[in-house]
Every structure is written in structure tokens, then in C-alpha cells.
Amino acid sequence: MAAEGDNITWYNYTGAEVIPHDATHVTVSARVIPAEAFSRNRNIVEIIGPSVEKIEARAFNKCPSLRRVIMSGVEIVEQCAFTECVALTDVECDKLEIIRYAAFNGCTSLGSINLPSVRIVEGDTFNDCEALTDVNFGSKLERIEEMAFDDCPSLERITIPLKDGIITHDGIFQGCENLKHVDIVEEVVLHETIAALQLEEWRNDINEEIDSINQILPTTPAGRWGHDVGDKARAIRTWIRLVLGKIVRYKAQHQHLLDEAATTLQLALPKDIVMKNVLPFLELQ
């Protein structure tokens, strides 16, 4: 039932009933929010649903007052679920894995979003999110699809894992003229791997390649709708492949040097010393 407060009306939604027109803050006890359940509701400001696992298509389509969504357990957001929620600024969905087509299209007040568990971002997901500046993905990200961030002119920074194949289309960042920085999710682990390489010139070469994307992006054309898709997505995809290629190559060369060193020591030292001391040490490298 609804509970009145200072200009606030709380309502507990169980998944099937019609929402009172004056409800402003909603808690959800259902596992699924049905399609169009809150569509075009002009009064809802906040929705909290820790038990929600799925938000169906257009569930909150064109809710102009919705500002905050807290759904810690949601895993799937279907197409157009929050399209044109123009007041939306806070989205907390730490277990979200799949974001369907145009789910947050036209959320013009959304400034930043953390998506640590997301695997798939379908096309047009954040299209026309004019205020969006930062997007942080986690290591589970598998792919970002066509036009996912089309026409996000304020987008400056994106955090992604270093995986080939996540940038699936040249138009992902079309119109994102301010996109200047790419951060790597596994940065600490990556730098530990690089630091373990034997030769300084290898380490320097990889680090320079990693840093290069943030030198290139500021002057890389973003393109614009109806004309060209720009080059930012292509630049990021190429950069990922170059960095991964160098890591693989230098790790192989590093292992080759270790193998050569082991062979030399086997020839130079008594066998029992090599077996008990030298080889176990080399295996740790």
C-alpha cells in the first residue's frame, strides 16, 4: 500500500497491479518488472528493487521524473526499458549482465554509469545520452554493438577490458567528439605482467603502446549521424590488437630466454643441483 510523507508517496509493487498515479517512490518485491509496467508514468522519482532480476521492454519508457534506479540483483534490461527517462541520473545495477537495444536511449541527464558485470551492450543502448561523461565496464565485458554510444557528445572516458572483439562496429562512438581516454580494467595485473618481462626495451615498448590510445583519441574524428561513423571505435579496436599482440610476442620471447638459460645451466652444473634448485626457480618466473 502507499504511504504518505512530505511530498513523497511510497508504494510497494508486487508485479501485476496498476500503480497509483500519485506514487513517487516505489519498492519492488517482484523478480520481473513486466513490459510497460511503469511506461509514461510522470510521477515516479525513485525505484528500488533488490529482488528484481529482469526488466522487460519499455518498463519505464518515457518516465520524465525518474531520477534514481537501485536494483542490485537485476541481470537483464530489455529493449527501450528506460528510453527517454530524461531526469535519470543514478543507476545502480551491479549484477547487470545484458543491456538490450536502446535500453537507456535518450536519458539526457545521465552523467556516469558503472557496469561492473555487464557482458553485452546491444545497439543504440546509450544513444543521445547528452550528459554522459564516464562509462566503467568490468572484466566480464564481451561486446559492445553498433551505435551503442552514438551521439554522446560529453563522453570523455571509458573503462574496458583488454579483449579483442569487444568493439564490434566502427560506429559505436559516432558523434562522441570528446572521447579522449580509454582506461584498462585489469591495469594492475597488466602492469605486473609487463614488469615481469626480462628486457627493459620490451617493457617500454608495451607501455608506450598502452599510452598511445590517449594520445591518438583526442584528434581522431568522431563522425556524425547521416555522414560518417568516425574513426574512434576503429582506433580503439586497432589499439587493443596491437597491445595484445605485443604482450603475446614478448611473453613468448621471454619464455624462450628462460628456456635457453635453463638449458645452459643444465649443461654447466651437476644434474642434482639443477633439478633441486635451478629448474624450480625458473618455473616461478
Image (tube, helix red, strand yellow):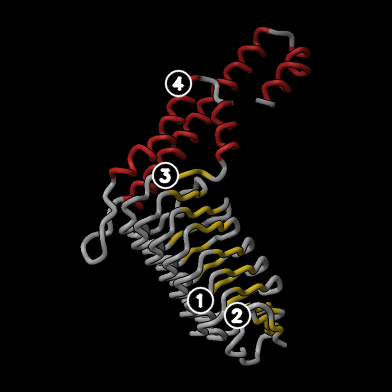
Indicate which disc, 4 or 1, sits on the residue closer to the N terminus: 1
Can you see residue 116?
yes
- Give SS at disc 4: helix
Tag 3: residue type?
A: His
Viewer-side label of 2, 4 = 2
Tag 2: residue type?
A: Thr
Viewer-side label of 4, 1 = 1
User: For mark 4, what is the residue?
Assistant: 201
Near mark 1 (Cα within 10 A), the count class, few <14, some 14-19 or many ≥20, is some
Judge whether 26 appears above or below 245 on screen.
below
| Quarter of image, res 59 | bottom right
Viewer-side label of 2, 3 = 2
- Give SS at disc 1: loop
Indicate which disc, 2 or 4, sits on the residue closer to the N terminus: 2
User: Residue 181, which numbered label?
Assistant: 3
- Horizontal and vertical percent for residue 228? 23, 60
Judge whether 164 appears above or below 174 on screen.
above
User: For mark 1, what is the residue?
Assistant: 65
Indicate which disc, 3 or 1, sits on the residue closer to the N terminus: 1
Tag 4: residue type?
A: Glu
User: For mark 2, what is the residue?
Assistant: 24
| Quarter of image, res 76 | bottom right
